Image (cartoon, grey):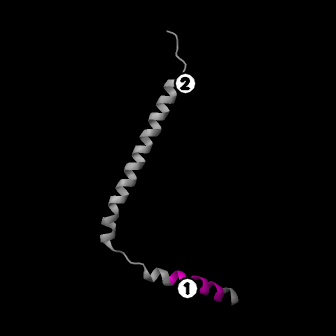
Amino acid sequence: MEFLTDTIETTAPAAEAAQELFFEPGNFVEMLRYMGIGMLVIFVLIGVIILATMATNAIFSKKKDA
């Protein structure tokens, strides 16, 4: 029985915190700006990685004599 009461006592704060959570659609709309900026940064970083890879390949690749 002691295990059961310990489990209930440790999960009680989580249950109380879950009751305080609520969904507000207005906040989601406001956060779309930040999500868009994050996606733009990811897109730019992928482009930089691609350009760095192409530059490295052009610099260090051996030319074939035709």
Query: What residue is at 44 percent from the left and 44 percent from the top?
Result: 45
38 in the magenta segment = no
Q: Which residue is mark 1?
A: 12
- Disc 2, SS: helix
Query: What residue is at 37 percent from the left and 58 percent from the top?
Result: 35
Q: Which residues are magenta?
A: 4-15
Type of the residue with mark 1: Ala
| Left or right side of 66 for 8 | right
Place of residue 38 in the rendered image (x, y in percent of width and height, measured from the top left): 40, 54
| Left or right side of 18 for 1 | right
Of the image marks 2 and 1, the number of the one nearer the N terminus = 1
12 in the magenta segment = yes
Contact between labelled residues 1 and 2, with CB atoms less than 8 Å apart: no
Q: Is disc 1 surrounded by few (<14), some (14 to 19) or many (20+) residues within 10 Å?
A: few
Query: What residue is at 57 percent from the left and 82 percent from the top?
Result: 11
Q: Nearer the viewer, mark 2 or mark 1?
A: 2
